[in-house]
Image (cartoon, rainbow, N blue to C red):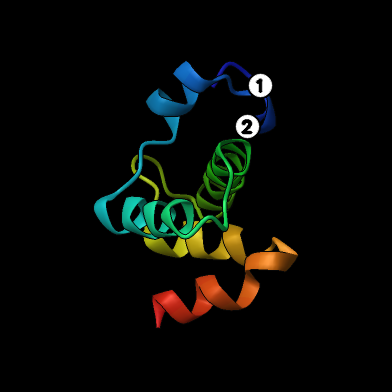
Amino acid sequence: RSGGLNAALDDQHLEELAPLGPAAAAVLREELERGRLTARGYHRVRRVARTLADLAGRDGELAEEDVVSALSMRTRFGLSALEQAA
């Protein structure tokens, strides 16, 4: 990704470089619909999930586990995200 940080990805590059798998999209959609995640938080979670996938050596779509892990790092969402994945 041209040596840039995932934290610096704009919305367009986020769509290209951090596409969501179906299960990952469902988890984020649920958080948005329940009002537990703002649009800003949504993008932050995707950036963190991309970083987690990178650290695990996975390219391509973000998996549910990446998104759940990223959500669990947010104090407010830790339990709800983990419960949804169970």
Q: Going by the image, does 70 lie left or right of 13?
A: right
Could you say where residue 38 lies in the image, as x and y percent from the top left?
A: 58, 44
Q: Quadrant of the C terminus?
A: bottom left
Q: Going by the image, does 73 lie left or right of 64?
A: right
Front position in the image: 55 or 81: 81
In the picture as drawn, the residue positioned furthest to the right comes out as 75
Could you say where residue 7 lies in the image, as x and y percent from the top left?
A: 68, 32
- Mark 2 or 1: the one toward you: 2
Could you say where residue 49 lies in the image, as x and y percent from the top left?
A: 54, 49
Tag 2 residue:
6
**Which amino acid is tagged 2?**
Asn
In the picture as drawn, the residue positioned furthest to the left comes out as 22
> Which mark, by number, is residue 51?
none
Front position in the image: 36 or 61: 36
Q: Going by the image, does 59 lie left or right of 73?
A: left
**Which amino acid is tagged 1?**
Gly
Could you say where residue 79 lies in the image, as x and y percent from the top left?
A: 60, 78
Give above or below for 36 relative to 60: below
Mark 2–mark 1 Cα distance, whole angstroms, equals: 7 Å
Q: Quadrant of the N terminus?
A: top right
Q: Residue at x 50, y 50 (%)?
A: 53
Q: Residue at x 53, y 42 (%)?
A: 46
The quadrant where residue 26 appears: bottom left
Other residues around mark 2 within 10 Å, as few (<14) / some (14–19) / many (≥20)? many
The secondary element bearing badge 1 is classed as loop
Q: Residue at x 59, y 60 (%)?
A: 71
Tag 1 residue:
4
Other residues around mark 1 within 10 Å, as few (<14) / some (14–19) / many (≥20)? few
The quadrant where residue 19 appears: top left
Q: Are marks 2 and 1 in contact (CB under 8 Å)?
A: yes
The secondary element bearing badge 2 is classed as helix
Give above or below for 78 relative to 1: below
